[in-house]
Image: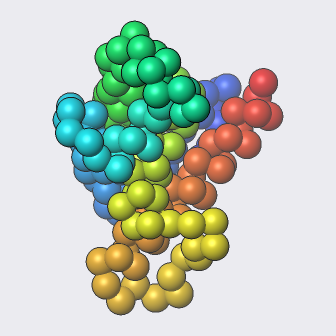
Amino acid sequence: MAILTEVDGRLQLDFADAEAAVLGDLLDRVASLLSETDDNPVLARLLPDAHRDDPEVAVAHRELTEASLRQDKRADIDAVLAALPAGEGKAELVDPDAWLRALNDVRLMLGVQLGITEDAEPPRRVRDQRDLQLSVYFWLTAVQDCLVEAVLSAG
């Protein structure tokens, strides 16, 4: 599993095997979804209505903010992709908050696609594609948790 370390006050993730490639692929999938305009359950989760009780206000708010929100999410994804190593290796987390937001977006995408609920648990064995994706989801959860702890302890 990717190991988070701090070197001279800077956070680094040391990726093993294909971890960086898996994360890169997932980030590309989120970026692709952010380019879509269709009604999509993943997009609804990534870009939720700000005012659920008032559809008119929600539409007006969306018109004012959605383009910049999509742009900000793409910028976070680009920052992470630029830092990912090709294969095994270390990634310096120049902007840990961008990493947190990008990891969260990947987890939201997977959560919707896999129908993850709060009762979901990691599979004991990987028997099929869903188990593999669920394992990746829980791996990202662990990475994000470590990163949150590191950011909070630094602040």
| Residue 13 to residue 16: above or below | above
Instruction: Report the number of numbered marks.
Output: 0
Q: In the displayed structure, does residue 56 sit left or right of residue 153?
A: left
The quarter of the rendered structure image containing the C terminus is top right
Residue 95 shows up from this direction: yes
Q: Residue at x 67, y 40 (%)?
A: 148
Camera-nearest residue between 65 and 69? 65
Q: In the displayed structure, does residue 107 sit left or right of residue 23?
A: right
Q: Residue at x 31, y 84 (%)?
A: 128
| Residue 60 to residue 133: above or below | above
Spot occupied by residue 141 in the image (x, y as percentages of width and height) = 57, 56
Q: Residue at x 26, y 42 (%)?
A: 39
Q: In the displayed structure, does residue 13 sit left or right of residue 86?
A: right
| Residue 63 to residue 17: above or below | above
Picture quadrant where residue 71 is located: top left
Spot occupied by residue 60 in the image (x, y as percentages of width and height) = 42, 14
| Residue 128 to residue 96: above or below | below
Q: Residue at x 56, y 66 (%)?
A: 117
Task: Identify the residue at the far top of this view.
Answer: 64
Spot occupied by residue 143 in the image (x, y as percentages of width and height) = 56, 52
Picture quadrant where residue 70 is located: top left
Camera-nearest residue between 83 and 69? 69
Spot occupied by residue 75 in the image (x, y as percentages of width and height) = 35, 22
Residue 89 shows up from this direction: no
Q: How is the image coloured?
A: rainbow
